[in-house]
Image: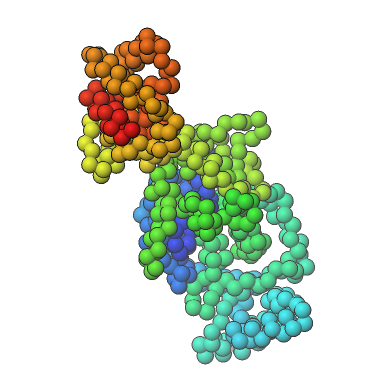
Amino acid sequence: MAQKIRVRFAPSPTGPLHIGGVRTALFNYLFAKKHDGDFVLRIEDTDQTRYVEGAEDYIKEALNWCNIPYDEGPGKEKDCGPYRQSERKDLYHQYAQQLIDNGHAYYAFDTAEELGAHRKDHEANGKTFIYNWHNRLKLNNSLSLSAEEVQQKIDAGEAYVIRFKSPQDESLHMYDEIRGDIQIDTNVLDDKVLFKSDGMPTYHLANIVDDHLMEISHVIRGEEWLPSMPLHVLLYKAFGWEAPKFAHLPLILKPTGKGKLSKRDGDKLGFPVFPLQWKDPKTGEIASGYREDGYLPETVVNMLAFLGWNEGEGSEKEMYSLAELVDAFSLGHVSKSGAKFDPEKTKWFQHQYLQLENNDALATEYNEILKEKGFAPSQEYVKEVVATIKERATFISDFWDLSSFYFEAPAELDAKGFKKAWKDDTSSIMRQVIEEIQKIEDFSQENTQDQIKSWITSQEIGFGKVMQPLRLSIVGAMKGPDLFHIISSIGKEETIKRMESAIAQA
């Protein structure tokens, strides 16, 4: 029977979730759902000094907002819990001891001062200090000391760490689902600390133990963990466990393509790098989020999917629903090279998804903005306005600039537009247009347009001489959708009022 697909997203609660982390969560989610598997959330909080209040809740809220909720994890306990490493700390010491007992790990009593001295000595000779096979028998550890000496140190309460005994003179063959075959000379590996002097495991030990106990089948994580892969594979071997399959996702690069995307890039270029707004509990500093900046979750998911993945050669499809992404996703089509972040492309996705949004729902949201501005139009009126202007909008926050003239008269006329549209005889022509408008009984868009255009033709006036100053009078600038839609929407009385006001300002 084939092993059930189980993947995990394992962030540290040290602050807001970067979109690189959201992309990792998304790819794990897509892979799990594609194979009818489980998507597990594990909170890796062994380093309590870096724990930030509210960060775990932020992670959960971000996943839910993106519509990629976890199946199993904190608050969704199943057989493999608990799902916070701080609640599992009693587990890890026995596994570290197991490695000592089978000769794959050892106690190291070297003090920070001793190790610092070794580093300085190496640097003075143009070398880099690495704690491994070539010097471990000369250092202060259970490999160089007698069993009695080791026990005496432990009994005396002397501080120690537990280090992994990396193998000497071996060629380690590994396979990455994205990068293919990888080969490492074990002589270049250092003897990593697995258990710290404070009684807590390091990431490396806790990660392996938890992945094994939670029956994780595939470890899909960021490229920054690739250097840790040899140690993790060796740890699985040392325990005698079957290792999961590994897949390391490419970095998300700055818009310039040089270096990893950071919060600083977002601040400098004016785009968020976090899914939700984050307020730092210590400094009070607020970092912008995609949700609060008006992006739809579908936008963020579609944008992130294309950072390092595409459906394959020949596919020009760019818009994918979450269900379509699940269907199309495969690790085989994830790129090895870094993916350049493009904020303009993100806005393009946002524009496309806004067009697909239900006008009723958009009108409800827009009505909230209108209420804040002191307007209380009917839902039907707002829905009609939204249907007319949304193709020009990228965000709901754009609606007011695109449609304010449907709700209030322009406070002033655009100077540049006035200079272009208002000539010596314009005021006289506008008064004649007012007279024609007063005669119209059926003030529908179609009829009003027919009546005014027929009059312009009959007077043998150029259309521009009438339509440009008329638009300026109604809108306040040379912009906006179909002018007769605006006129019929605001009604005859308001139309004439605005025209008279423009003549008075001329």
The picture quadrant where one finds residue 133 is bottom right
The picture quadrant where one finds residue 173 is bottom right
**For this rendering, which residue is in front, 345 or 150?**
345
Does residue 332 lie above or below 189 as drawn?
Answer: above
> Where the C terminus falls, by quadrant?
top left
Does residue 202 lie above or below 322 as drawn?
Answer: below
Image coords of residue 21 (percent x, y): 51, 53
View extreme (top): residue: 458
**For this rendering, which residue is in front, 393 or 160?**
393
> Where the N terminus falls, by quadrant?
top right
Image coords of residue 301 (percent x, y): 48, 42
Does residue 86 lie above or below 342 as drawn?
Answer: below
The picture quadrant where one finds residue 168 is bottom right
Image coords of residue 181 (percent x, y): 72, 51
Does residue 30 lie above or below 432 as drawn?
Answer: below
**For this rendering, which residue is in front, 35 or 367?**
367
**For this rendering, which residue is in front, 107 or 131?**
131
